[in-house]
Image (cartoon, coloured by chain):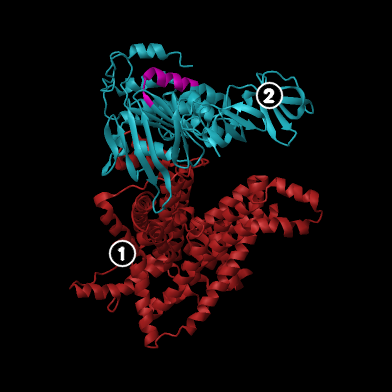
Chain colours: A red, B cyan
Amino acid sequence: MLAHVAVLGVIFALPGLFIFTRTSQLGDELGETISASLAPLGRTILLSASVASTAVLLGTSLAWLLMRTALPARPSLRVLVVLPLVLPSFVGAAAFLAALAPGGILHGTLDLIGLEAPRFRGFWASWIVLSLFTFPYVFLPVAARLLALPPSLEESARVLGRGSVATFFAVTLPQLRSAIASGGLLVFLYTVSEFGAVQLLGYDTLTRVIFASRLSDRATSFTASCILIVLAGTVVLLERLSRPPQRANDPVRSHPVEPQQLGRWRLPALFFVLFVILMGLVVPVASLATWAWRGVRDGRVGVDGLLGAAINTSVVGVITSVVAVIAVVPLAVLIVRHRARSANVASIAVVSGFAVPGLVIALSLVFWTLNAPVIGGLYQTLPLLIGAYVIHFGSQALGAAEDAVRAVPDSLRESSQLLETSASVRLRRVDMPLMRPSLVSGGGLVLLSTVKELPATLLLAPIGFRTLATEVWGSYEDGFFAEVGVSGLILVALSAMLTWVLVLRRSDAIRAS
Amino acid sequence: MFGTLDTVLARRQPSPVGSPADRHGDGRAASSAVTIADVSVTFGGSDDAVVRSASLDVPAGQVVSLLGPSGCGKTTLLRSIAGLQRISSGSIAVDGVTVAGGKTFVAPERRRVGMVFQDGALFPHLTVEQNVAFGLRGRSGGAERVAEVLELVDMGGFGDRLPGTLSGGQKQRVAVARALAPEPAVLLLDEPFSALDAGLRVQVRRDVKRLIARLGITTIVVTHDQEEAFALGERVAVMSGGSIQQVGTPTELYEQPSTPWVAEFMGEGIRLAGQLDDGRVTTSLGQLPARTTNSAGPTSGAVDVIIRPEQLVVEAGSEAKVVDVEYYGHDVRYDVELRGGHLLSVRALRADFAVGDEVNVVFAGADVPVWPR
């Protein structure tokens, strides 16, 4: 098992190490490439900081409005407000571009009121699109924290003479700080790694530089990747350090809490929530749907062609999730049961696989296989693509695998040992049934991420191997909005289904009435 | 444990905060009467009232316990007084001023009530001092007041500690200090000691009781624990199913319960069927004198009676058998099975019998309460 973990750690750390090694070998070129990367680095940081702060403002205010106030239809609004999560940001970006293009729904609407559609490009466009599709990453942990927060804290503040606004800032907000920080840093990381949306919207961040220079100017590509890894690593490290030691939540008594009456703010607040849902969900989906409907009506797009892409997406996703779960279970056993130090080192490698942008992992695997004599044959094969996915998303299965191992406590294993001598029977009848739910949900999260992934798929998929993500991408590049619409809708539907089963259905905050 | 109380009270003249509540000038805060009139509370959308037509008068300076099993609506009623829960009908007034009822709803932050929650609800990100000062925002002499109330609850040396580092009893003391700091008109305690260990609970309870008695503040305590209700409350309101069943002193409730339910909730007892005739009830334990204080009670016919364990005595005999003995030190409890299969509990001072002994059970009380069947 130790050997397995050692190999696992090395594999997960490989892409990063490879990039670092190659960058360090650049020699004199290094200074040049670093100075060439500084401006894109600035743009990456500017965009990530802007998107993260906007997501924090949106996610926190929406969580408070939907968890604490007397807004009407809160249970439905809570679900709707999380749904922008199901749109991969590059699909969202494509949907907005399609909506603002002549014939798109926003273009038409603006035309009606005599306005010209704005040029949707660059920083502002990227900022708006990424904020709209990432704020649920803040909303979910903050809403969960609000639900877990003992109501007596806020009630105490009220009884002690503070109004509702003062109570929010003096008592509620300090309690939400760690949830806001972890959500905000996740969004920051997401934006640092983002490739598809910034590429479509033409904002020159590091990822765009890496992609553009990957063939013509490898030195710049390596350096930019290296900077990106350092940036992402710093953010993850900050998040870890700022995370307070986990406190057990006090059991919350179940007396119903009076929701905050909003008075004259009720209508503006409701409009705010509905506007976010409109922009994050309704407009992009409607934009895709109108183009798709036109295409299908005029017989320009066949759904048949996309069936293959949908099947490819699903099959690769399922294989990836199975491989990822199998790969990390031994590590989870070592972490949970034996608290092995080697396991912790390996787990850092696994988690860093998530922090390293998918584009960089893909790029490193491309160069590595192209240059290595024996494994060169792996280039543009499915195993390499799946390997990249597993390295990138394995950490999402690790947490669930640890839960699965914890589901079989020592006392239970010991009592089953006393009752049944055969290890395989014990595994089948005791361990597996208890571990299955967590393993399935861990695998599901990997599947969801794989379905939405773009840059690694673009770089590593075998020639002619089409997935829904590459289909959306390719159609947009070719200017076929109708095909973008159809494949985008299928992708969104698939992702929505997985999100519902894996995230929303399990969230107490979403289900709370 | 609050040994410093008297000195602190002496130091309080004149009040450093110059509070309007301290009208007596003797350190005793002027407190306010609470009038609850016909209050009902219904939670959103449901037809079932959690509190039904509850009425209760709490004179200024009195301590009243709201006692009832969980889910009886007592906490909801308390939260209505604080303004944390809106009432559906009826009214609540403090010192004759309506704070809830009709179109009136005074926000909790304007009601001048102090509240101590079951979990203490100390703000985890603030120190003990900052917690206590929370309700004093913008007042002059705040720091002195904080030191003073912390002294009152014997937590003087803990000002810069974070709540996470305190024990359960210490947390509740700080919670009491925080509630008292702004000199509220009314103090509300919601199961304040239930999260504490048994021994600590009694200690903190005694300390808090002494403190509120000295301050003379109107206090309403919610509890599901009969012992706690009796120990703290000058009067006790018993709630069940959302209604206040009976209000009285602990003695009144124990000796003259208005319903069999109250009687059984007030303490252990066995309920027997009997026939009432001319002031005497014929039961399977023989003829017992009926209690006559309840003028509205029945005068004859089929009735229920409640017999308390301490109203019975066991003697050597042959009519019953001891099936269990629980020895408590200061007294002993026998479970005795009568010939007919009836099980009785008997409280005695001495453990004279053992399991299996043949005994007689004799009624030794003055009388028993009766209700029509």
Assign the magenta stretch its main secondary structure. helix
Identity, as a three-letter code, of the amino acid under mark 2: Val
Q: Relative to A326, does residue A241 appear above or below in the rendering? A: above
Q: Amino acid at mark 1?
A: Ala
- The residue labelled by disc 1 is A125
- Foreground mark, 1 or 2? 2
**Residue sitting nearer the eye, A373 or A411:** A411
Tell which residue pokes out farthest to the right in this image.
A421
**In front here: A98 or A441?**
A441
Inter-mark Cα distance, 1 to 2: 91 Å
Q: Residue furthest front?
A: B278
Q: Is residue B76 left or right of residue A1?
A: left
- Relative to A1, residue B203 above or below: above
Q: Residues within 10 Å of mark 2 (few under 14, many from 20)?
A: some
Disc 1 element = helix
Q: Is disc 2 on the same chain as disc 1?
A: no
Q: Position of residue A161 (x, y in %)?
A: 31, 34
Identify the mark at residue B362; answer none if there is no mark: 2
Q: Chain of mark 1?
A: A
Q: Position of residue B7 (x, y in %)?
A: 39, 11
Left or right placement of residue B194 versus residue A275 in this view: right
The answer to which image quadrant residue A195 occupies is bottom left
From which residue to which does the magenta span run? B206-218
Residue A269 in view: yes
Tell me the residue at 79%/28% (across/down): B356
Instruction: Judge whether A103 appears above or below A269 on screen.
Output: below
Is B216 inside the magenta-drawn segment? yes
Residue sitting at 56 percent across and 40 percent down? B373
Residue B83 placed where, x, y %?
34, 39
